[in-house]
Amino acid sequence: METRTTRELVELRQPFSVKSRIGKLPPGQYMIELHEERFDGLSFPDWRRSSMTIADADPRHGERQDASPLTPSELADLLNADLEP
């Protein structure tokens, strides 16, 4: 099965939490990775999400943390909350 990974660097200005981790994570840069698998059951190429993760990409935080599972709705909530003053 063919797979692909898309990466996006996001900067969060406020401490935040995700369901898959205990406690708050500090503000900084985080790498979002979207992993998809090709779905071959149709007459056209299509992709479906197999997983999404968030990992610390900010060198100020020291050693890089393990990637944590994340849902699209969690990511949207994080980004929207970060826009609030």
Image (cartoon, rainbow, N blue to C red):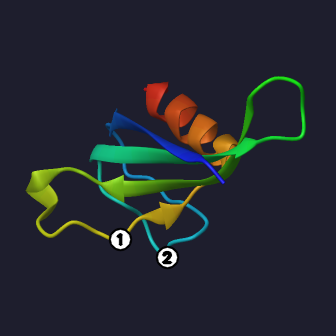
Q: Residue at x 46, y 25 (%)?
A: 83
Labelled pair 2, 1 in contact (Cβ < 8 Å) = no
Camera-nearest label, 2 or 1: 1
User: In terms of depth relative to the viewer, which is nearer, 37 or 68?
Assistant: 37
Give the residue type that dot 1 points to. Answer: Asp
Q: Horizontal and vertical percent for residue 61?
A: 15, 60
Residue 25 placement: quadrant: bottom left
Q: Residue at x 45, y 53 (%)?
A: 16
The residue labelled by disc 2 is: 22
Q: Residues within 10 Å of mark 2 (few under 14, many from 20)?
A: few
User: In terms of depth relative to the viewer, which is nearer, 31 or 38?
Assistant: 38
- The N terminus: image quadrant: bottom right
Q: Residue at x 15, y 70 (%)?
A: 63
Q: Horizontal and vertical percent for residue 38?
A: 69, 42
- The C terminus: image quadrant: top left
Q: Horizontal and vertical percent for residue 84?
A: 49, 27
Badge 2 element: loop
**Looking at the image, is 7 positioned above or below residue 68?**
above
Residue 55 placement: quadrant: bottom left
Taking the image as shown, residue 14 lies to the left or right of residue 41, namely left
Give the residue type that dot 2 points to. Answer: Ile
**Looking at the image, is 21 positioned above or below residue 7?**
below
Q: Horizontal and vertical percent for residue 37?
A: 66, 48
The residue labelled by disc 1 is: 66
Taking the image as shown, residue 13 lies to the left or right of residue 64, namely right
Furthest-right residue in this view: 42
**Looking at the image, is 40 positioned above or below residue 22?**
above
User: In terms of depth relative to the viewer, which is nearer, 42 or 8?
Assistant: 42
Taking the image as shown, residue 11 lies to the left or right of residue 34, namely left
Q: Residue at x 45, y 72 (%)?
A: 23
